[in-house]
Amino acid sequence: MLRARKEPLEDRSTVAPAPARVDADLVVHADVVGALALIVDGTVKGAVRADSVLIGPRGRIEGRVDARALRIDGTVLGDVVAETVALGPTARVVGNVTHSAITVAPGAEIDGRRPWRPPGHVARG
C-alpha cells in the first residue's frame, strides 16, 4: 500500500554535488575538464582542469593541472596553475607551479619554478 508523505521532500537545489573521484585502481587516459571538485587517488594521463583538485598520496597526474584550489599529496608531472596551492609532505611536482598563494610542507619536492601572480591574475587554461 502506498502512503502519502507527511514531511516535505528535501530541497536538493542547494546541496553541493559530491566530488568526482579517480580511485586508486583506475588509470584515466584522457583530459579531465569540468566545474567540479576532483579527488585523484589513481592516475590521470592527461590535463586536468577543475574548480578544486585534491591529489592523494598515491595519486598521480601526468599533464597540466589548472584549478582554483589545489592540494597535492601525490605526484604531478606537468605544470600547475592555481590560485591557491598546498603541497603536503609527500607531494612531488616536476614542472612549474604558478600561484597566488602557496603552502609547502617540509618534505614536499618541486622540480621547477614557482612564479607568483596577484590574486585574480592567474591565467588558467
Image: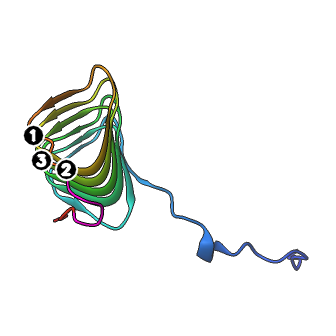
Q: Is residue 13 above or below residue 104?
A: below
Q: Compare residues 29 and 111 and report the one nearer the observer.
A: 111
- Relative placement, left or right, of 106 versus 5 is left
> Residue at 15% of width from left, 42% of height from top?
114
Residue type of the residue flagged with mark 2:
Trp
Q: Do callouts 3 and 1 mark residues in contact (Cβ within 8 Å)?
A: no
- Relative placement, left or right, of 36 versus 107 is right
Mark 3 Cα shell of 10 Å, populated few (<14), some (14-19), many (≥20): some
Quadrant that contains the N terminus: bottom right
Q: Do callouts 3 and 2 mark residues in contact (Cβ within 8 Å)?
A: no
Q: Compare residues 55 and 84 and report the one nearer the observer.
A: 84
Q: Of discs 3 and 2, which sits in the foreground?
A: 2
Magenta segment, which residues? 117-121
- What whole-number distance in Å separates the C-alpha atoms at marks 3 and 2? 14 Å
| Disc assigned to residue 113 | 1
- Please tell me whether residue 69 belongs to the stretch shown in magenta: no
Name the residue beneath numbered marker 2.
Answer: 116
The image quarter containing residue 40 is top left
- What whole-number distance in Å separates the C-alpha atoms at marks 1 and 2? 10 Å
Residue sitting at the far top: 107
- Relative placement, left or right, of 86 versus 13 is left
